[in-house]
Image (cartoon, rainbow, N blue to C red):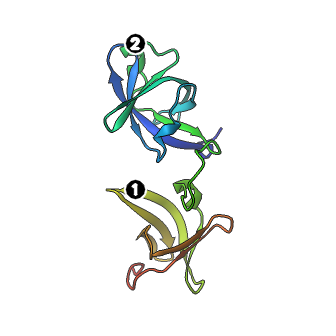
Amino acid sequence: MTPEDLVVVGRLARPHGLRGEMSVEVLSDFPERFVPGLAVVGVDAAGKRRSLVVSAVRPNGERLLLTFQGVSSRTDADALRGLDIAVPKGSEVPRPAGFVYHFDLEGCRAVDRSGRELGLVTALEELGGRSLLTLLTASGERDVPFVEPIVVSVDLEKRLVVLDPPAGLLDA
């Protein structure tokens, strides 16, 4: 499995208690995906992978506390600190109408209402509660708020995003 085959859904922050629980920063719009029996891949900063299976889940404020099979002490859990938790693409939670995953948009062409090419979508990021679409244009990268009425439509089959940017938004 390549990095492109995975979707990061969380980050292991730190051990919680003495019995192997981990505090997890959830990076998924669907925290309900974390259930006992869920097989995930832990990925470190160098790209090294480790297979993990969730054995227990409980809420803890803004985060979740996860326990993994075979991780039964604080020392075991500390060895997982900082790992990204990923699942294979294709195992996503069914999406609500109109919902798109950030990775769905990467590589889509962006055009204006008239069909004029604006650029290529390179990312969709959540920053401070706002979603920003990053476009690679002829004059460099530009960030576009991912909101109506700027985003007119998204056609994942055609790999096309239609935008109606206000004057000056994409200027160099």
Q: Position of residue 106 (x, y in %)?
A: 56, 60
| Mark 1 closeness class: few <14, some 14–19, many ≥20 residues within 10 Å | few
Give the position of the C terminus as an image quadrant. Answer: bottom left
> Any mark on residue 73, and which?
2
Q: Nearer the viewer, residue 55 or 96?
A: 96
Asked whether residue 99 is in view, the answer is yes
Q: Which residue is mark 1?
A: 126
Q: Position of residue 63 (x, y in %)?
A: 36, 36
- Given the image, on which type of amino acid does mark 1 rest? Glu
In the rendered view, tell whether residue 87 sits above or below residue 161: above
In the picture as drawn, the residue positioned furthest to the right comes out as 157
Locate residue 149 relative to residue 7 in the image: left or right.
left
**Which structural element holds mark 1?**
strand
Q: Residue at x 68, y 65 (%)?
A: 157
Q: Compute the Cα span from label 1 to label 2.
A: 34 Å
Q: Residue at x 44, y 76 (%)?
A: 149
- Looking at marks 1 and 2 on the same chain, the residue that comes earlier in the sequence is marked by 2
In the rendered view, tell whether residue 118 sits above or below residue 13: below
Q: Nearer the viewer, residue 74 or 67?
A: 67
Asked whether residue 106 is in view, the answer is no
Locate residue 63 relative to residue 118 in the image: left or right.
left
In the rendered view, tell whether residue 155 sits above or below residue 82: below
Asked which quadrant contains residue 79, the reply is top left
- Given the image, on which type of amino acid does mark 2 rest? Ser
